[in-house]
Structures are given as structure tokens and as C-alpha cells.
């Protein structure tokens, strides 16, 4: 579930980096480019990093949290130092907490240690608590941050009105794909605060959403997870064959028809647990090669 939220937010940043800089209160100017956030030689990859070409260029590091992390302060310091070292630019670090459950003792906005001049550490980062953002400001902001509107400072009874306001904003967009992806992101983020049925009921009449690649991946993920649960409880007839058939069907929808060697590899797998594992991970794979290797 968390991976779904992560992928959605990262896509929004990639598509609309200026909107997220505005939300964070960071300066923007010139070219904005989302760059490689990999610092895996020492630590895990940061969420999203934007190269901002202002007169004094800098990197904006955006980290998104939907769950508690007692080590967040230290992790933000680590990312800041590694990104600064790798790119030789100042780094402005921002954490966006997507729901109250992500807040806690590990989120103080900085790390400060030592009193002596030669042993002092003073690092600060910005913290944005989504549920405290004024809903009207988010609705009036950029398209890239618009899907946050139902989970900011708004009562549940007012969420239908917020959905209507999002619809009015999206009527001005020229591309149906962007409209579809924005609705899909809205649907996914609603799930951070409300039960899935609430979001489905609110967005039931949104036809564009089904055109979204993001939405299709949600459907595929649900099918894969449903199959995995069925396999685990022994409810699927012809269990291995059925699992293999779903992997081929979902994979073809994402990557096109599989090559003969891919089919042969899948046909050669008779272990139920292996097929189940592939069914669960196929939504995150990038190619048929990812599906049949690295099991």
C-alpha cells in the first residue's frame, strides 16, 4: 500500500516540480529538472530531488512520509550531506508528512549536537504536515499538488465539495491523460485518510480516471493481490496454472506479448510459492526480464 502512495507522489513531482516547490515555499527560477536521487552507495535513495536553476542554483530534496519513522531526522541529514557531496550544490531538504500517523518524536525538523565550535552540528529541514494545509490554498495551487486537497485541513463532510472543486479545475486542462492521472492520484491519496469505499463512492462518476495508467496499475495490483490471497488459502482451481495465466495476462497488458523464452521460463516453474511471488511483484516490474529474473 505504501509503495502505491510513494509512486503516485513521485509521479506528481516529476510532472509538476514547480508546484511542489511552491507548496514547500522554495524559490523557483529557470530550468527545473528532477534528477537522479540515488545515493545507494551509502544509503537508500531519496524520494525526489529537483535541480533548481536560480541565480544561485540549489537542489530541493523532497521526502514523503505516510508512516512513522523514528530515524527520519538522521536520514534527512544523511541525504542532505550525500546529495551535497555528489552534486556539489547546496541542498534544501523538505519532508511532507501525508497523514498524522507519520508524525512523531523522530520528526523535529533538524539535528543539533555539541556546544564547542569545532564539534557543533546544526542541520535544519522543513516539515510540511499535509493535514494542516488550508484546503482553499491547495485548491488554488498547482495541478501537481491538487490531489492533496481531500487529505489536507478539511472535514470529511466537506470532501465531496472539494472533489467538485477539483473537477472544475481539471475542466481547464487540455489533455485527457493529465486529467485521468490527476483523478487517479486523488483516488489513491484519499485512501491515506479514508476507507477505500469512501473514495470509490466519491469518484464513481469520474470516467476519465479509467484512462489513467496509474488507475490501470491499481486494478492490476488488486487482481494480483487477490490471486495471491486466493493461492495462499487454496481457493483457486488449478492453482499453479491459474497463477501462471494471470502473470502472463497482466504482463502482456504492461509489456506486450512475451518472448518465447519468457513463456518457456514461466511454464517451467511448477512451484506455487514462486508463481505467487511473481504475481505479487509484477505491478512493480519494468519489463518481462524483471518478471522472470531476480526471483
Image (spheres, rainbow, N blue to C red):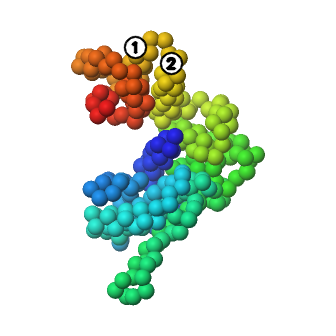
Q: What residue lies at 39% left-to-right and 21% top-to-bottom?
A: 272
Query: Which circle marks residue 203 in the picture?
Result: none
Q: Is residue 188 left or right of residue 7?
A: right
Which element type, helix, strand or loop, lies under badge 2? Answer: loop
Quarter of image, res 287: top left
> Mark 2 against mark 1, which lies toward the viewer?
2
- The residue singled out by tag 2 in the image is 234
Q: Is residue 260 left or right of residue 136?
A: left
248 w.r.t. 115: above or below: above
Q: Going 46% across and 66% down the picture, which residue do you hit?
A: 73
Where the C terminus falls, by quadrant? top left
Q: Residue at x 51, y 50 (%)?
A: 144
In the rendering, at what x and y percent does residue 291 appear?
32, 29
- Which residue is rendered at x = 68% and y = 37% of the image? 198
Q: Position of residue 227 (x, y in %)?
A: 49, 23
Q: Residue 241's mark?
A: 1
Q: CA distance from mark 2 to mark 1?
A: 13 Å
Q: Nearer the viewer, residue 286 or 274?
A: 274
Q: Nearer the viewer, residue 229 or 40?
A: 229
Badge 2 density bin: few <14, some 14–19, many ≥20, Cα 10 Å: few
Residue 249 seen anywhere in this rendered image of the structure: no
When the figure is inspected, residue 108 is found, relative to residue 136, above or below; the finding is below
How many marks do you count on the picture?
2
x, y percent for residue 293: 27, 31
Q: Nearer the viewer, residue 209 or 90?
A: 90
Residue 244 image-quadrant placement: top left
Residue 275 left/right relative to 146? left
Label 1 sits on a secondary structure element that is helix
User: Eyeballing the image, is 281 above or below 130?
Assistant: above
In the displayed orientation, state which residue is furthest to the left.
261
Identify the residue at the far bottom of this view. Answer: 116
- Which of the 4 quarters of the picture holds residue 240? top left
Amino acid at each position: 500500500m505504501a509503495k502505491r502512495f510513494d509512486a503516485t507522489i513521485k509521479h506528481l513531482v516529476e510532472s509538476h516540480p514547480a508546484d511542489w516547490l511552491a507548496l514547500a515555499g522554495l524559490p523557483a527560477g529557470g530550468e527545473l529538472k528532477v534528477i537522479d536521487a540515488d545515493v545507494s552507495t551509502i544509503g537508500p535513495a531519496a524520494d525526489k530531488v529537483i535541480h533548481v536553476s536560480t541565480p544561485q542554483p540549489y537542489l530541493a530534496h523532497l521526502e514523503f512520509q505516510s508512516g512513522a519513522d523514528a530515524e527520519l531526522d538522521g536520514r534527512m541529514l544523511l541525504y542532505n550531506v550525500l546529495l551535497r557531496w555528489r552534486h556539489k550544490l547546496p541542498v534544501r531538504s523538505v519532508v511532507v508528512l501525508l497523514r498524522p500517523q507519520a508524525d512523531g518524536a523522530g520528526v523535529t525538523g533538524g539535528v543539533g549536537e555539541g556546544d564547542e565550535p569545532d564539534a557543533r552540528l546544526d542541520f535544519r529541514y522543513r516539515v510540511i504536515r499535509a493535514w494542516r494545509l488550508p484546503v482553499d490554498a491547495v485548491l488554488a495551487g498547482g495541478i501537481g499538488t491538487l490531489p492533496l486537497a481531500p487529505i489536507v485541513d478539511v472535514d470529511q463532510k466537506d470532501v465531496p465539495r472539494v472533489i467538485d472543486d477539483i473537477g472544475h479545475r481539471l475542466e481547464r486542462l487540455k489533455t485527457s491523460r493529465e486529467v485521468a492521472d490527476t483523478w487517479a492520484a486523488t483516488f489513491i491519496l484519499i485512501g491515506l485518510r479514508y476507507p477505500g469505499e469512501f473514495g470509490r463512492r466519491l469518484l464513481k462518476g469520474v470516467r476519465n480516471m479509467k484512462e489513467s495508467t496509474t488507475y490501470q496499475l491499481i486494478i492490476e495490483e488488486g487482481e494480483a493481490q487477490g490471486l495471491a490471497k486466493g493461492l495462499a488459502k487454496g481457493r483457486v482451481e488449478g492453482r499453479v496454472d491459474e497463477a501462471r495465466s494471470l502473470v502472463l495476462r497482466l504482463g502482456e497488458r504492461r509489456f506486450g506479448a512475451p518472448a518465447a523464452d519468457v513463456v518457456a521460463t514461466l511454464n517451467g516453474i511448477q512451484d506455487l510459492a514462486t508463481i505467487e511471488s511473481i504475481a505479487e511483484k509484477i505491478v512493480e516490474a519494468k519489463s518481462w526480464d524483471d518478471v522472470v529474473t531476480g526471483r
